[in-house]
Amino acid sequence: MATLSLVSFTNVREAHRPRGACMAVECAFTLIELLIVVAIIAILALIAVPNLLEAQTRAKAARARADLRSLTTAIEAYHVDNRDYPLARTFCAAFMDTMGDYNMCPQELTTPVAYITERPLDVFNPRHQYKYIAPGTGYANYVQTILAIWVPRAFPEDTGWVDDVAYYERAKAPVLWALWSVGPYGAKPFYQSDAEHLPVPKRTWYDPTNGTASEGVIARLSTGHVSP
């Protein structure tokens, strides 16, 4: 009789349980189910994160091209007023506080006449401006000197670094000035940048078809040539 009473009580309790209710053990996830959920989240993250990073890189590259276009307008406006292009300035390791701005964007674009409201910072090179080079008279570590621009002998074609020519006279140079962003790969040291003859030869240009984070600079030249 005791056993029958216990069964009867259990049946009554089950009959009065709210519809849809379940025991805690019955509603919990098993370890296998949790592992499956974690694996799915990890797979989705592996798919989404690279796409997000690529989208960010493409957006930055578009911003860099727009900034270089604005700087080009300012440079040409300066040329109209002064019948010459701004002087180039560069810094090497002797000036560690400014060496990151080697081939710095011309300060004449903002003062004393504001051809552009400000010299924008390179979106791929935090705290540093876009870079600029022009052959002829310029400054190295604040000392007036003669600077060169490397141009392929068959410009605009590029047949390799051995055929590049260093032009020191603006009147003879095929390219009168060049602007560039360091690109997604990031900035290179001054001496490496000079050794690779940045930024005129096409082999030094960033090409997104090689991968959004591939090596190369985003360039814009006085001749109207631009990197992809």
Image (cartoon, grey):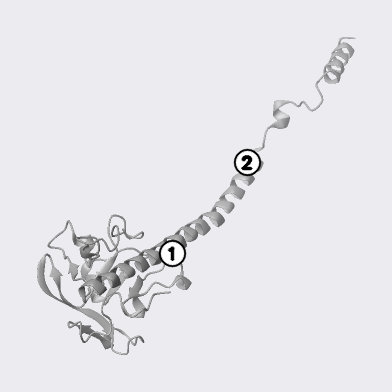
Figure quadrant of residue 46:
bottom right
Q: Is residue 156 left or right of residue 12?
A: left
Taking the spot 10% from the left edge, 71% from the top edge, the residue there is 144
Taking the spot 56% from the left edge, 57% from the top edge, the residue there is 47
Q: Is residue 94 left or right of residue 79?
A: left
Taking the spot 56% from the left edge, 50% from the top edge, the residue there is 42
- Seen as rendered, the residue at the extreme bottom is 154
Of residues 175 and 199, the one drawn nearer to the viewer in this rendering? 175
Task: Name the disc covering residue 34, or none.
Answer: 2
Q: Is residue 141 left or right of residue 188?
A: left
Residue 31 spot, x, y in % from top left: 63, 39
Number of numbered discs on residues = 2
Taking the spot 33% from the left edge, 60% from the top edge, the residue there is 122
Residue 53 spot, x, y in % from top left: 47, 57
Instruction: Say if 11 sits above or below 215 in the image.
Output: above
Residue 140 spot, x, y in % from top left: 13, 69
Q: Secondary structure at mark 2?
A: helix
**Callout 1: few (<14), some (14-19), or many (20+) C-alpha neighbours within 10 Å?**
few
Q: Which residue is mark 1?
A: 62
The amino acid type of the residue labelled 1 equals: Ala
Quadrant including the C terminus? bottom left
Q: Earlier in the sequence, mark 1 or mark 2?
A: 2
Q: CA distance from mark 1 to mark 2?
A: 42 Å
Q: Is residue 90 left or right of residue 64?
A: left
The amino acid type of the residue labelled 2 equals: Leu
- Asked whether residue 66 is in view, the answer is yes
Instruction: Say if 210 sits above or below 125 in the image.
Output: below
Of residues 16 and 52, the one drawn nearer to the viewer in this rendering? 52
Q: Secondary structure at mark 1?
A: helix
